[in-house]
Amino acid sequence: MAILDDQTLDFISTSFEQTVRLGVRLGELMVVDDIICLNGELGSGKTALATGIGRGWGAGLQVTSPSYTLVNEYPRLRDGLLLYHIDCYRLESSAEIVTAGLADIFDDGGAIMVEWPEKIEGLLPEDRLWIELRHISDTRRGVRMKASGDRPERLLKLFRQSAFGV
């Protein structure tokens, strides 16, 4: 694990299960208005991390990739607060982004995960935790987390303490 600075953490996950567990740790720490951006090529572990985040959030349903529906909503069992999971893979134009109503979600009072966030980067608030996943081998994934803003920096610090004890 490398702590590059207060805003950046870089580490390797050695299995699908570990990626899910790390997602659980992150999801447990999330609050309303947190925005997590999951970026990386196909097969890099975005959905595994998102599945864990949903578990940690306390969603009553298994998180799956909303590639065809664009947005899935996961209410937290204990209080009904929503975790939105947006998958922008299929978005091709700014007209599709506007028609999909994604801008409204950022004002809706939930926590948000975005896969393929580079496709809607202009809509994203500056305060966000950007997670870049990269394929290293069949079982290993590189993960780099970059926080922008006070709350994302705090979230990254809490995650680092929870997941790695530092």
Image (tube, helix red, strand yellow):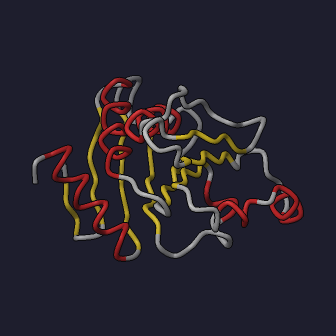
Residue 131 x %, y %: 43, 54
Which residue shows up at 37% across the image and 38% down it?
56
Q: In which quarter of the image is the C terminus?
A: bottom left
Image height of 165 relative to 135, above or below: below
Q: Nearer the viewer, residue 44 or 148?
A: 148
Give the residue drawn at x 73%, y 60%. 102
Query: In the image, is 96 to the left or to the right of 157?
Result: right
Look at the picture and state if 5 lies above or below 51: below
Q: Is residue 46 left or right of residue 105?
A: left
Residue 113 position in % (x across, y down)? 54, 50
| Of 36 and 11, the residue lying toward us | 36
Residue sitting at 26 percent across and 46 percent down? 11
Report the number of discs: 0
Q: Where is residue 64 in the image (x, y as percent from the top left)?
A: 59, 30
**In this rendering, would 97 be left or right of 16?**
right
Q: Nearer the viewer, residue 40 or 52?
A: 52
Q: Which residue lies furthest to the front in this view?
A: 79
Residue 132, percent across and down? 45, 52
